[in-house]
Amino acid sequence: MNKILLPQTVKNLPTDSLRMFVILAEIKSISATAQIISRSQPAVSLQLKKLEETLDTTLFLRNKGTFNLTRNGEILLHYAKQILDLNDRFLHELSQNAEQQSIRLGIPNDFIQQFWPNTLSSFNRQYPDICFEIYEDLSVNLINMLHHSQLDIALTLLPKKAGKYCVHAVEKQLFWVGHAHLTEKQPLPIISCFNGCSYRNNIETALKKAAIPFKTVLTTNNFYTIYDAIERGLGIYALLSSDKNLKNYQHCTLPQLPELRPLYLGLHMKPVNVSETIRTLTNHLKISMQ
């Protein structure tokens, strides 16, 4: 006869603690983890301490503010991901009816390639019955769509960190890119997006403040066209430090031009009628935003 474990002899691992642990293990920062799960740093530290006490083991080696997994930490990470996956799948199936669920996600034109190959495709493999409706547009238009309940989640790139429905924001630095000889031209030839684009506003503000005359040689919201124009030496533009295409243009970064203000990659979501699936997706997106 199998032995029955009574409740007082069993250690229970709270899923919120496991979720915190997985995020911390992946990004190795208490402050960033606290931002992602919307808790204070002391609260996260206390939660980690209680988890280690429950397991009677050390999960991380602390060194100058960074967190590296111990052997037991690596073991827990392996099982924690499976536990959370089962938890999320169960809650997802429990909340579904016979109809396929759609998630309406707004993403700035240039960010779809950053989030689709990894975050969204892996999430889609985990939840294959989810249908994504992706809307690519300027950030100001995406915010407007969210306010009118036309989106469930909006990712934006704006000069301000806050917003009515902003649940997470990460600062991103801009870098000038273009062929070096173009900086000698007067007026300076620049590539631009249409009105309302944060890139355009940032570029034009910096040049006007530095009293550098400029002219727009190309205006488009298609970022593949912009990347091609940079490569061909048509004009000068600015890319984010997190833009995967920046590494292709390291040979033509232009530090001699005026410093550009940082922009904020924001995650926006209305706090009403939020399904567990959407909450899970926002956690995946927060990690990808770092």
Image (spheres, helix red, strand yellow):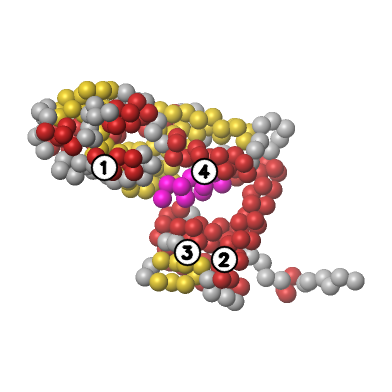
Verify CB contact (< 8 Å) between mark 1 and mark 2.
no
Q: Is residue 173 left or right of residue 25?
A: left
Where are the magenta residues, as a range?
Answer: 280-290
- Whole-angstrom CA distance, mark 1 to mark 3, is 41 Å
Q: Is residue 289 magenta?
A: yes
Residue designated by label 1:
251
| Residue 254 horizontal/vertical position (percent) | 20, 41
Disc ID at residue 44 = 3
Q: Is residue 39 magenta?
A: no
Of label 1 and label 3, which has the lower sequence position? 3
Q: Residue at x 27, y 28 (%)?
A: 232
| Residue 57 horizontal/vertical position (percent) | 57, 75
| Residue 206 horizontal/vertical position (percent) | 17, 37
Of label 2 and label 4, which has the lower sequence position? 2
Discs 1/2, front? 1
Disc 2 marks a residue whose amino acid type is: Glu
Q: Nearer the viewer, residue 97 or 260?
A: 260
Q: Quadrant of residue 101?
A: top right
Residue designated by label 2:
74
Q: Residue at x 53, y 40 (%)?
A: 120
Query: Label 3's element?
Result: helix
Of label 1 and label 2, which has the lower sequence position? 2
Q: Residue at x 54, y 29 (%)?
A: 133
Of label 4 and label 1, which has the lower sequence position? 4
- Whole-angstrom CA distance, mark 3 to mark 4, is 24 Å
